[in-house]
Amino acid sequence: MVDGDFARLTQVFANLVSNSVKYTEPGGRIEVTLCRSDSDAVLTVKDSGIGIPAESLDSVFEMFSQVQAHKEHAGGGLGIGLALVRTLVEMHGGRVEAQSKGSGKGSVFTVRLPLLQGSAVREPAQEGAQRAQVSQQAARRILIADDNTDAAESLAAILRSQGHDTYLASDGRQAVELAQIYRPQIIFMDLGMPHLDGLSATREIRGQPWGKSMLIAGLTGWGQPEDRRKSREAGMDVHLVKPIDLSDIAAVLLRS
C-alpha cells in the first residue's frame, strides 16, 4: 500500500505503458511487474522496443525534450508525457528512472514509491517548502498558449493536478481572445506561434485594461540577454528557457 492519488498514479502507469506500446513494433513484448523492495513499492514497465541511446537517458524526463530516434514513432509529439510522469511520481515522494542498453534494445522504466507503513517522504527542505507553499495556494485561472498540443496539454495536466483551472490556446491570436474571455491570472506564453507570435500577443494583452495585472511567463528555447530583453520589453514578467521543470512552474505560481 502507498499513500497516493488514485487518478494521478493511474495516469503515471497508463502513460508508461502507452509509451512502451508506441515505441514497440507489432510482435514485440511488454512486461509490467510490481514488487516490494525494502521500504518501496517498485513497478517496472519493460519493453522490447526501439530503445534509448545512452546519451539521451538523462534527458528523457525533461519537459519539451524528444529523443531524436523516437520522433518518427511519436507522430509529431514531443514525448513530454514522461515529464508529467516524473512530476507526479516526485509529488508522491517517489522517483522514476529509465534504463536501456541502446537503440533497438528495448527500455525499462522503473517507478519507486514509498510504502505506506513506516515510510517517510524525503525531499530537500527548500523544495519541500516550495511545494507546500504551492499546494496551499488558491486555485488560479491559467492560460497556456502553445501551438504544440503535446506541450500545452502536458503542462495543463500538471497544473490541473494542483487544482488550477486551465485554458489552452494554439496560437497567439487565440491567446488574446481567450485572455479577454477568461481573464486568467497567469499566462504561459510560447514565443514561437503562428498567426501571432508570443511577443506580439503579449503586447496586445498588455494594451488592454484587463491585461495589465496578469502574470505572463514566456516559454522559449532561447535564453540569451537579447532574448530576455525582448520578452521584457513586450511586457512579460518571466522568461523561461525550455526544457522547464516543476521548480520553474512552482516559481511562477508563487509570484502570482
Image (cartoon, grey):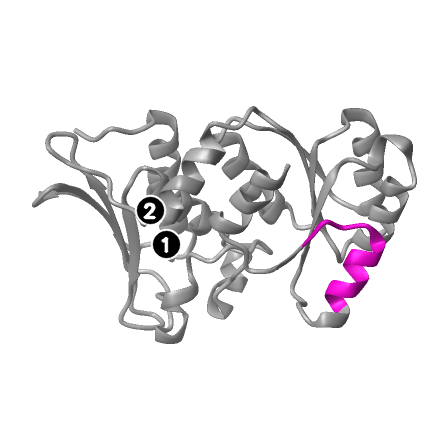
Q: Quadrant of the N terminus?
A: top left
**Residue 182 on the magenta span:** no
Residue 58 can be seen in this image:
yes
Left or right: 147, with 211 as reference point: left
Quadrant (top left/top right/bottom left/bottom right) for the C terminus: top right
The amino acid type, in three-letter code, at marker 2 is Ala
Indicate the position of residue 38 as horizontal and vertical percent values.
7, 45
- Residue 41, percent from left and from top: 16, 40
Find residue 252 and report its image quarter: top right
At x 59%, y 49%, the residue is: 151
Q: Which residue is mark 1?
A: 26
Q: CA distance from mark 2 to mark 1?
A: 46 Å
Q: Residues within 10 Å of mark 1 (few under 14, many from 20)?
A: few
Q: How many marks?
A: 2
Of the two numbered discs 2 and 1 on the same chain, state the one appearing first in sequence.
Answer: 1
Residue 128 in the image: x percent, y percent? 36, 42
- The kind of secondary structure element at disc 1 is loop
Q: Which residues are magenta?
A: 227-238
Identified at 59% across, 60% down, the residue is: 242
Count residues near mark 2 (Cα–Cα under 10 Å), then give few for <14, some for 14-19, many for 20+: few
Q: Is residue 116 left or right of residue 177?
A: left
Q: Where residue 72 sits in the image (x, y, percent)?
A: 53, 63
Residue at 53 percent of width and 63 percent of height: 71
In front here: 228 or 148?
228
Q: 201 left or right of 166?
A: right
Majority secondary structure of the magenta segment?
helix
- Label ID, residue 125: 2
Q: Say which residue appears at 47% left-offset and 69% top-offset.
A: 69
Name the residue type under label 1. Pro
**Who is closer to the viewer here, 16 or 166?**
166
Q: Secondary structure at mark 2?
A: helix
